[in-house]
Image: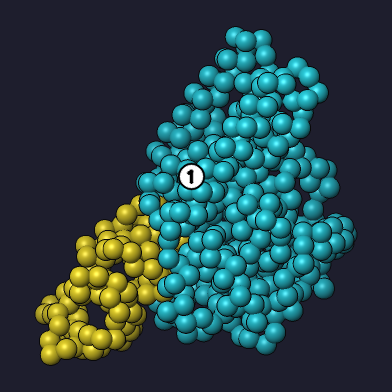
């Protein structure tokens, strides 16, 4: 399996301390921009009930599911307590020429 | 209006045939309608603050202290009655929305404050903390879906006898104490196993054992002192002060549609005065809460203003809600398929969910 870099959006399309949804093929991802201007990516759906995390609130380095308050550290994908028990998958992200790129395995 | 049900009396258990039927009908973990609101505005509304809940909690605890002291001071005379009536409502009714809001993680910005008040309020309203955390998550996933939602207050047809007992929270007391004893010896019932992951069971068992120790101490104190007084503060308030919590609970969904994917059809928003909103922590905006559960209680009135154009008209007061609820319950005794159809308009359910977020028929 090799990583393939996918163009997600321009840097300015994600606000600081916020998240957007990115769909690619049959998969959905959540792309984050932290308050200190770093970018991260995780699977797009909460591991509890398959809710889109991009509708949730980013607080510091935590994404909160908009439905049940499941929280994850989006840098590591770590589930931070009930009702989420399963960690999120994370993906490499980089910025190149003002574009946010996401690495997915192909 | 009557619903198209194949049977007049349905099986509300989570382990019965209705669970599979709900899955077949695409009602499990499905996409629910949400009134449109911009991401920017929603982010503003979802922002957490410590200030409002710190003030609210301070007032609540002070009121408990004053009424509790009045009850002690006048104990043995009729003058203690109004103090304990107030104490009971503050203890057993007001604790319920505080359990609820902290369970959603929306009362405070600071996580440990939510967790601490959650444990205290759970004990006061007799909701086992870990059982109800998971049960409430399911309630939000499958709101009033028969066979899936463990928090349907009045299954149809309603029993007036059970409702009378519920006014004194007797069914809750018996169910909770049965659950606490079962969990204290490390057992889960079949229904609980459908919504509590096994990895969480040890927390359920530990909390139940701690509760039993607390109750044993309170009972021991009552026996030692030859007085009911300790039980008037811990234990009995659920019986004499939980009535308003039950009435609040009736207003949320009772008499409205089952098995729909639109909270505008199965939730009530009711205007209430400041005292009731304080006790109820703004859960009178129940439709808004269900549609956007991560909006804190102190921002629900603002959310209501944002989406009210897309929602059925709110009820003017709690009395207007009961003018609808009581006749509906009486009709449902004869016709369990009867329910109130709220004027929802022509908006159709959201369909932009990603394929992976569609109903998982499991």
In the foreground, B190 or B86: B86
Indicate the secondary structure of the residue bearing disc 1.
Answer: helix
The residue at the point 66 percent across, 10 percent down is B226
Q: Measured from the top left, where is residue B127 in percent x and y?
A: 57, 42
B294 horizontally vs B324: left or right: left
The residue at the point 60 percent across, 54 percent down is B281
In the foreground, B234 or B152: B234
Query: Would residue B217 be seen by someone viewing this image from the given angle?
Result: yes
Tell me if residue B9 comes above or below residue B237 in the rendering. below
In the foreground, B159 or B109: B109
Tell me if residue B26 comes above or below residue B96 in the rendering. below
Which image quadrant is residue B60 in?
top right
The residue at the point 52 percent across, 69 percent down is B292
For disc 1, the neighbor class at 10 Å (few under 14, some 14 to 19, many from 20) is: many
B211 horizontally vs B110: left or right: right
Letter of the yellow chain: A
Q: Measured from the top left, where is residue B119 in percent x and y?
A: 47, 40
The subunit carrying tag 1 is B
Q: Measured from the top left, where is residue B250 in percent x and y?
A: 73, 55
A56 horizontally vs B227: left or right: left
Indicate the colouring scheme: by chain
- Find disc 1 in the rendering and name its residue: B118
Colour of the chain lettered B: cyan
Q: Measured from the top left, where is residue B263 in percent x and y?
A: 62, 71
Query: Would residue B11 be seen by someone viewing this image from the given angle?
Result: no
């Amino acid at each position: 399996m090799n990583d393939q870099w996918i163009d997600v959006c321009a840097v300015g399309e994600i606000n600081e301390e916020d998240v957007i949804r990115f769909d690619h093929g049959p998969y959905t991802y959540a792309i984050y921009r932290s308050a200190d201007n770093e970018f991260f990516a995780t699977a797009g759906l909460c591991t509890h009930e398959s809710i889109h995390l991009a509708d949730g609130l980013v607080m510091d380095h935590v994404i909160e599911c908009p439905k049940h308050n499941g929280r994850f550290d989006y840098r590591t994908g770590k589930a931070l307590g009930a009702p989420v028990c399963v960690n999120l998958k994370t993906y490499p992200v980089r910025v190149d020429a003002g574009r946010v790129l996401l690495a997915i395995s192909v | 209006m009557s619903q198209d049900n194949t049977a007049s009396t349905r099986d509300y258990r989570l382990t019965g045939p209705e669970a599979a039927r709900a899955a077949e009908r695409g009602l499990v973990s499905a996409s629910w309608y949400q009134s449109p609101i911009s991401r920017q505005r929603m982010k503003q509304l979802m922002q957490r603050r410590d200030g409002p809940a710190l003030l609210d909690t301070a007032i609540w605890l002070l009121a408990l202290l004053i009424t509790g002291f009045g009850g002690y001071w006048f104990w043995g005379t009729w003058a203690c009655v109004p103090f304990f009536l107030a104490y009971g409502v503050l203890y057993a009714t007001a604790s319920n929305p505080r359990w609820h809001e902290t369970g959603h993680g929306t009362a405070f910005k600071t996580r440990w404050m939510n967790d601490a008040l959650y444990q205290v309020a759970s004990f006061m309203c007799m909701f086992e903390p870990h059982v109800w955390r998971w049960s409430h998550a399911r309630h939000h996933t499958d709101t009033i879906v028969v066979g899936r939602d463990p928090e349907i207050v009045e299954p149809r047809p309603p029993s007036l006898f059970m409702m009378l007992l519920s006014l004194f929270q007797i069914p809750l007391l018996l169910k909770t104490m049965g659950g606490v004893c079962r969990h204290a010896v490390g057992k889960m019932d079949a229904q609980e196993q459908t919504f509590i992951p096994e990895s969480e069971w040890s927390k359920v068992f530990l909390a139940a054992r701690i509760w039993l120790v607390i109750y044993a101490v309170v009972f021991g104190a009552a026996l030692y002192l030859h007085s009911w007084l300790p039980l008037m503060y811990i234990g009995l308030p659920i019986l004499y002060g939980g009535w308003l919590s039950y009435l609040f609970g009736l207003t949320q969904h009772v008499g409205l549609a089952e098995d729909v994917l639109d909270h505008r059809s199965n939730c009530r928003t009711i205007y209430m005065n400041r005292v009731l909103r304080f006790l109820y922590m703004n859960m009178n905006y129940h439709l808004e809460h269900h549609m956007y559960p991560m909006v804190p209680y102190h921002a629900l009135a603002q959310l209501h203003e944002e989406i009210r154009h897309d929602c059925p008209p709110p009820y003017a007061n709690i009395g207007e809600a009961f003018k609808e609820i009581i006749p509906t319950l009486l009709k449902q005794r004869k016709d369990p398929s009867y329910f109130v159809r709220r004027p929802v308009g022509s908006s159709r359910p959201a369909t932009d969910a990603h394929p992976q977020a569609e109903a998982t028929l499991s």
